[in-house]
Amino acid sequence: GLFGVPELSCPEGFQEAQDKALQESEQLVQKACSTPPGPETVRIFDQLSDSLCKVADLADFVKVAHPDFAFREAAEEACRNIGTVVEKLNTDVELCQSLRRLLADESITSSLDPETRRVAELFMFDFEISGIHLDEEKRKKAVDLNVRILDLCNEFLIGTHLPNKIDKHVLPEHIRYNFIAEGNYLQVAGLHADCPDDLVREAAYKIFLHSNAQQLSRLEDLLASRNSLAQLVGYDTFAHRALQGTMAKNPETVRQFLEKLSDQLSKRTQKDFEMMTKMKMKLNPQNSMLMPWDHPYYSGVLRAERYNIDPGLYCPFFSLGACMEGLNSLFSQLLGISLYAEQTKRGEIWSEDVRKLAVVHETEGLLGYIYCDFFQRPDKPHQDCHFTVRGGRLKENGEYQLPVVVLMLSLPHSARGAPTLLSPGMMENLFHEMGHAMHSMLGRTRYQHVTGTRCPTDFAEVPSILMEYFANDYRVVNQFARHYKTGQPLPKNMVSRLCESKKVCAAADMQLQVFYAVLDQIYHGKHPLKKSTTEILKETQEKVYGLPYVPNTAWQLRFSHLVGYGAKYYSYLMSRAVASMVWKQCFAQNPFDRAMGERYRREMLAHGGGKEPILMVQGMLQKSPSVEDFVDALVSDLDHDFETFIMDS
């Protein structure tokens, strides 16, 4: 069976696994309600969470990645059914009372260890944001709103990826071949951001981002429903509800962070836009005004012109085998951990090119498993991500339930006779995703509710972004980057050039991220919104980003992150700030420092979500960072390294 789960040898097995989980959860609910308040209550709650997550988490992965449609469909159904049960449990008054009795008894709570207490409070928080304190009618309304939001999220997500069609005669003949033809229509499925022809990018931008009434009403409905739910359960806005328990804590801090960052970036961004405009004038003198479809293309042209970083020059040094060796060596030196290839049993994997790795510590033994689903295949989403399939926890019999995760990438299959070669971007993504995997392996908490990456969103990206700093450090890269034919190491100036090239137009790139984050905050802020979502987009784009809004476009209808990162899009920037501070203070001097590696594990990875994120950051940095510190960390990363600059000049 998939992942060694016997029921999942066929799609119908999802029904069986789901029934088993629901039966087990019913027994645990009764047990929780009849157990006297104490640490045992928290353990039962976590067991209940585990029995449902074991099926839901696994199904979450299978529904997007399994090559067999029947498996994907069965997994989708299981996700929906378990989601509905979870919503019902979150409004089960009797179940909540058993936890409330525990938290209300000062003599019991004072005797709980910090992790158990935090987990109890997190479960209580789940009840409260689902409206447990409301009367029956309002509770039912909260459940209905949650189900509605889930459906709208799925519909909106599908809509963000759908191509747009246009009558082919509308486009000049010489650019039609760039798009897929369907009879008299052309299909535009993306922004063609790398296309050297300005006209193709302009057409793709205007057609792909053209407003769509159905998708617009889904978005408006989603934002309004989220706001109604937040207000129903006692929050001013959805953002206030979403930011509870995060590093930022509230929308005010997020706003302050984004405003200060924007102020610090503005002069640099202006400079970047001026450089791009000059480049556009040089290549296209008739039309030199910089437009939103120009930014990704011309920043790439500037990068390539200033630092010769053709990926073809780098790929031969980054074979997949070499990169995995590099990760293995780094983890071994920093954390005492090795990765071993493991034989899989029949039916355990969903595609024959999936590899299973055992993660083993030099003294603690086996920590968990990573399934590597690295290669492209039809129907597989083109996204790099980390999935928790099973969370770690201390079982009733004293054994530890080992975590299981999947790392999904979209690497090309190797050419005959050559290994799989990664571009620098792919190599960095591999390191990034491996950062999540290590968090999952080392966040060995007693409770699965807070295991590994089950922590606030603005902290969850810290371990993965920190790995990007390692991937961009010559001392690390030099340990594994070898030409697959000659064995020659990657020259140091090539690594320096690659790192410096990433700083070209980096302020404008970051400004774009600030714009997305501000937009997300406004959409999830005070309702009813003062204007339509498109008018808000136009106003925010011109004020925060600086490139003109294009009439009749509605970029927000392609903003898929509004689903998974609603009111939390800023997280990526804040996590990057923390990762930057950790790198500079703890690893920049020596990226293989074992004592620092152990401190990093002890202070940041070991707790999963079982400790307040800002306390983990304080433990690692030995100080409490301010909003200004976050901003300074991000902005100082944009400064050029003088030595490389001189060498290259």
Image (tube, rainbow, N blue to C red):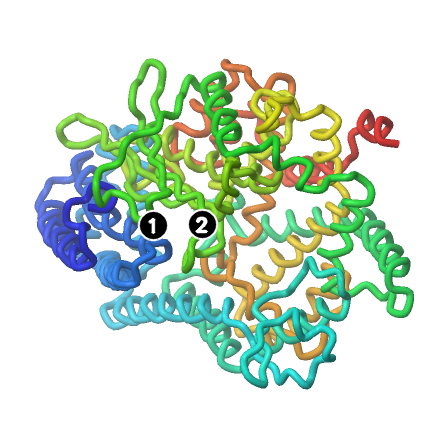
Mark 2 touching mark 1, by CB under 8 A?
Answer: yes
422 or 189, which is in the foreground? 422
Identify the amino acid type marked 1.
Answer: Phe
268 or 642, which is in the foreground? 642
- Residue 237 image position (x, y, % from top left): 49, 63
Identify the amino acid type marked 2.
Answer: Gln
- Tell me the distance, in whole angstroms, between the alpha carbons under discs 2 and 1: 9 Å
Residue 481 to residue 428: above or below:
above
Residue 110 to residue 20: above or below:
above
Check disc 1: other Cα within 10 Å, few if <14, some if 14-19, many if 20+. Answer: some
- Please tell me whether mark 1 sits on a helix, a strand or a loop: helix
Q: Quadrant of residue 148?
A: bottom left
Q: What residue do we see at 71% from left, 42% from top?
A: 310
Check disc 2: other Cα within 10 Å, few if <14, some if 14-19, many if 20+. Answer: some
- Please tell me whether mark 2 sits on a helix, a strand or a loop: loop
Q: Quadrant of residue 547?
A: bottom right
- Residue 63 image position (x, y, % from top left): 32, 58
Answer with left or right where residue 47 lies relative to residue 319: left
- Residue 528 image position (x, y, % from top left): 53, 74
Q: What residue do we see at 64% from left, 71% from top?
A: 536
Residue 454 to residue 215: above or below:
above
Residue 244, which numbered label?
2
Residue 125, which numbered label?
1
- Residue 211 image position (x, y, % from top left): 59, 78
Q: Quadrant of residue 31?
A: top left
User: In the rendered picture of this protein, how many numbered marks are placed on residues?
Assistant: 2
